[in-house]
Amino acid sequence: MDAIPAQDLQAGARRLARPSTAVGARAPLTVLITGFGPFPGAPFNPTGAVVAALVRRRRPALTGLRMIGHVFRTSYEAVDAELPELVARHRPHVLLMFGLAARTRYLRIETRARNRRSLLFADVAGHLPDVAAIRPGAEATRRGRAPFARLLTAARATRAPARLSSDAGRYLCNYAYRRALELEPVLPGVVFIHVPKVRRSPMIRRPGRQRAVTAADLVRAGEAILLGLVAGVRRR
């Protein structure tokens, strides 16, 4: 399965894009929140639950936001087929993406996406890319335009451990983020958040050990990041 060229992704989104992406301070905003399903080595992916919880969230700060949730099957084909279709159909102002980083113990706010993908790790459909480059000949990395420092401050204010990251990996998370950043001409706000594993059952905390990140932590931090991203779009 070959990757869809960036110009085709952009063209598909532009067919239904707004005449202008300018957003007034009180204008309603559409937010698309995405996660991923299980993948080899991760039979439970918490991002689907985070997406569902955020879409159901009912708080005064979220008033006026139209929130759409979507969980991708962890395959290149799913991202290529569904991401441009979701953007074209819902025309979101904000795209907040979540993925699992199983070896990380904190939230990673990704600032860049690489033009690389692994030739060693297959997706859930068993597909391995033919070439490492996502877009042969394109820039090695692409940096997002989100207000990353503000998002980090917002996440840490919820007491969730969080850091900025400039390496989104070489698997589906990085791939989806790169594709999303290619759509920035019609998407005013895009960011990808890697989350750590969470336990599905309570765990006794041992003295001196850092408290494990919980699903509730992810949702609170996700909401704070979402509000920071929305504020950034409204300032433009």
Image (spheres, rainbow, N blue to C red):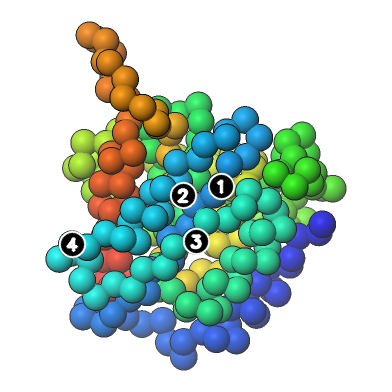
Residue at which label 2 appears: 48
Q: Look at the image and tell me in which quarter the N terminus lies.
A: bottom right
Identify whether 31 is placed above or below 38. below
Amino acid bearing label 3? His
- Residue drawn 25% across the image and 52% down it: 224
Q: Are marks 2 and 3 in contact (CB under 8 Å)?
A: no
Q: Which mark is residue 37?
A: 1
Residue 87 or residue 235, whichever sits in front: 87
Q: Label 4 to label 3, Cα distance in Å?
A: 21 Å
Q: Label 1 to label 3, Cα distance in Å?
A: 10 Å
User: Dot 1, crowdedness within 10 Å: few (<14), some or many (≥20)?
Assistant: many
Q: Are marks 4 and 2 in contact (CB under 8 Å)?
A: no
Q: Are marks 2 and 1 in contact (CB under 8 Å)?
A: yes
Amino acid bearing label 4? Arg
User: Dot 3, crowdedness within 10 Å: few (<14), some or many (≥20)?
Assistant: some
Q: Residue furthest top?
A: 207
Amino acid bearing label 2? Gly
Asked whether, in this view, residue 100 is left or right of residue 232, the answer is right
Residue at which label 3 appears: 70
Identify whether 68 is placed above or below 27. above
Amino acid bearing label 1? Gly
- Residue drawn 35% across the image and 61% down it: 55
- Residue drawn 60% across the image and 71% down it: 84
